[in-house]
Amino acid sequence: MTEKRSVHLDFHTSQEIKDIGKDFNKEEFKKNLKKANIDSISLFAKCHHGCFYYPSNKFYTHPYLVRSLLDEQVEACKEIGVSSKIYLSVGFDEYLAFEHPEWLWVNEEGNFQTNKFEPVFTLMCLNNGYSDVLKQQTIEVMNRYMPDGIFYDIVVDIPCYCNNCLKDMDKRGIDYKNNTAVKEFATENYNRFCKLMIDTIKNIKPDTMVFFNSGNFPVGEKRFINTCDQLEIESLQQAIGDMTIFR
């Protein structure tokens, strides 16, 4: 039996880096996929920096993108029968973080929530207009590529204390000092976001696989798993022994 592999092709690339895709060779890419017995691969539409890797008319294309990298990668996969899933960063979008600071996730101390790795990215809250932007980004990706799957990254339900969340909790009579109630509110926002994305995707292409990555799933925890059509295990060395990648 021939061994098959699924690869997640990480591609978080600062907008300061030039000549993105300059040396990409589609034929060499196909050759390497076949040589490695790859049958499924995740390809980047948008990274943590908020950069898109195809020429978008609506969203922030990497300023130094030389070619439509994602188009060529998807075409290569189709030509050799490799399934391609499209990656969209959710929790981190440095471009929109600067454009819309009101969309940032805020912790209980009133500070912006960040990851604990280098480089440091600032977490986006999903209980605001950012979710609408993500929906439009998803629609564009789906209509452009009709992919086999969508991989959403950094989708979490940790409590947020931004002005919008505090206002919504106040309207619903939720005491923001009650940790249990705030956690339940955060989980509701998580589920609402997942449903919005799932409905958006399935309305365009019902058989598209959807995965929401939150680092790792705690053993026995079903509230995250039940939103996914497939499971992917993140085996980063720094995540071992820690079920969350956030402070």
Image (cartoon, helix red, strand yellow):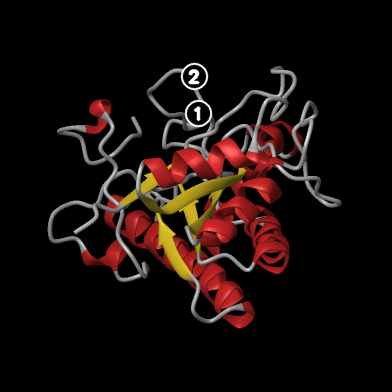
Q: Looking at the image, can residue 71 be seen? A: yes
Callout 1: few (<14), some (14-19), or many (20+) C-alpha neighbours within 10 Å? few
Q: Is residue 244 left or right of residue 50?
A: left
Residue drawn at 28 percent across, 32 percent down = 236
Q: Residue 17, relative to residue 80: is it above or below?
A: above
Q: In this view, does 11 lie to the left or right of 227?
A: right
* x and y percentages locating residue 168 in the rendered image: 55, 61
Q: Do the residues labelled 2 and 1 touch (CB within 8 Å)?
A: no
Q: Looking at the image, can residue 177 be seen? A: no
| SS for dot 1 | loop
Q: Which amino acid does label 1 sit on?
A: Asn
Q: According to the image, label 2 marks what residue? A: 119
Q: What residue type is labelled 2?
A: Pro
Split into 4 quadrants, where in the image is the C terminus? top left
Determine the CA span between mark 2 and mark 1: 18 Å
Q: According to the image, label 1 marks what residue? A: 111
